[in-house]
Image: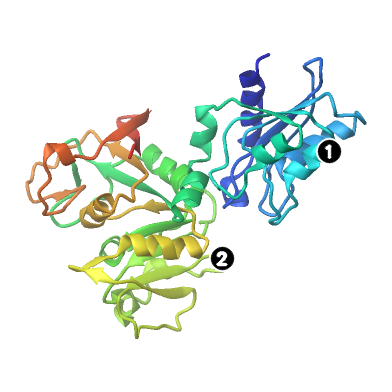
Amino acid sequence: MTHADYLKKAFLLSTKAKAKRIRPNPFVGALIVNEEGVIIGKGYHKKLGGPHAEVYAIEDALSKYNDLSKCTIYVTLEPCSHFGKTPPCTDLIIKHKIKHVVIGSLDPNPLVSGAQILIDNGVTVDEVFLPEIRSLNETFFINTTKQRPKFQLKIASTLNGKIADRFGNSKWLTNEKSRAFVHSVLRQNADAILSTAHTIIKDNAGLNIRSHNKQPIELNAIIIDRKLNLLKEVHSTSAIFYPRTRSKIYLVTDDETAHTNKDSVEIIHVNFHNNKADLLALSKILFLKGIFQVLVEAGGKLNSSLIEANLIDELFLFITPKIINDQNAIDAFNIDKEQTMDQIINMELQKVEEFDQDILLHYKNII
């Protein structure tokens, strides 16, 4: 087996973790391989604050062998070299005299420098970068390098690019299978949903996670609501205000005097320009509040504002076999701004999926 083969096994091991249990940490898998090429230890990072993958792998190997000095450790991410919630993994590798480390991706945090510390201590370090490792940890890389959440935009559109009729009605453009995917995958993996008060009021949206025959699961909601319309008495029984014990509603406004005693509701203050929230500033605030991945389910104006701010990292575009033949129906993007061909935004297609007659196009921002 090649280095890449072992790393692929470590990668598959890392995918056993649940994203929300480990955030903001990355998915990491590790293998210990002896000089005969036999895997004698394995592990993966299971939860935030718990042991790292290298710790599990080394403990597993030590339960069978006393001497690891002739072994190689394969780890999908550069071992950490600093004290956080757990001790440095580099110290453990050096302690057990493991002389060869193969890593599948570098840690984007310049403070880590785990590979260099290992090299300085006589350990041979090989780098065999696998794109699937980077892709799996994209949220971690964006969090670390940009100090903001990863934003995923979900759009359900007709064949001619409409997301609702002229009155704002959109139930239902997509079929049940598409909607189930949104809940079981997109919402399930998000720390919060971003929308607007207009959308919430129009749809009476709860923005939770729903599945057949199961209790809905709470999910943080971030709502652009400059005038705090949702706090008006007329909306006090809206679906968004379901009883919450583990989630919050963040209302975004520029009213610095605004406050509320409403349970599970928090006010976030940002500047507004031309009636549009400062989304980059909002993203930094959300990151500091421990929100690392955001799903956007909104209308054309917010969609366009996020694109304009270069905050959309992924696009999930559901195309339905329907046409709304009305020029006044609502478009997926809605911004009155000149843009020439040399200014267009390029997305890279990742995957195409079919849900009966619906098609899902998954894109990533390549900027």
Residue 93 visible in the picture: yes
User: Relative to residue 121, is residue 286 depicted above or below?
Assistant: below
In the figure, residue 5 lies in which quadrant? top right
Residue named by callout 2: 246
Taking the image as shown, residue 58 lies to the left or right of residue 260, namely right
Looking at the image, which residue is at 50% across and 65% down? 289
Looking at the image, which residue is at 80% across and 38% down? 94
User: Relative to residue 350, is residue 260 depicted above or below?
Assistant: below
User: Relative to residue 12, is residue 35 depicted above or below?
Assistant: above
Q: Residues within 10 Å of mark 1 (few under 14, many from 20)?
A: some
Q: Residue furthest left?
A: 327
Q: Position of residue 312 (x, y in %)?
A: 33, 47
In the figure, residue 54 lies in which quadrant? top right
In depth, the one of 88 and 59 nearer the eye is 88
- SS at mark 2 in the image: loop
User: Relative to residue 124, is residue 121 depicted above or below?
Assistant: below
Looking at the image, which residue is at 26% across and 76% down? 227
Taking the image as shown, residue 292 lies to the left or right of residue 121, namely left
Q: Earlier in the sequence, mark 2 or mark 1?
A: 1
Residue named by callout 1: 59
In depth, the one of 362 and 348 nearer the eye is 348
Q: Position of residue 118 (x, y in %)?
A: 71, 37
Task: Tell me the CA gap for discs 2 and 1.
Answer: 34 Å
Q: Amino acid at mark 1?
A: Glu
Q: Position of residue 221 (x, y in %)?
A: 42, 63
Q: Position of residue 163 (x, y in %)?
A: 22, 47
Q: Say which of marks 2 and 1 sits in front.
A: 1
Q: Amino acid at mark 2?
A: Arg
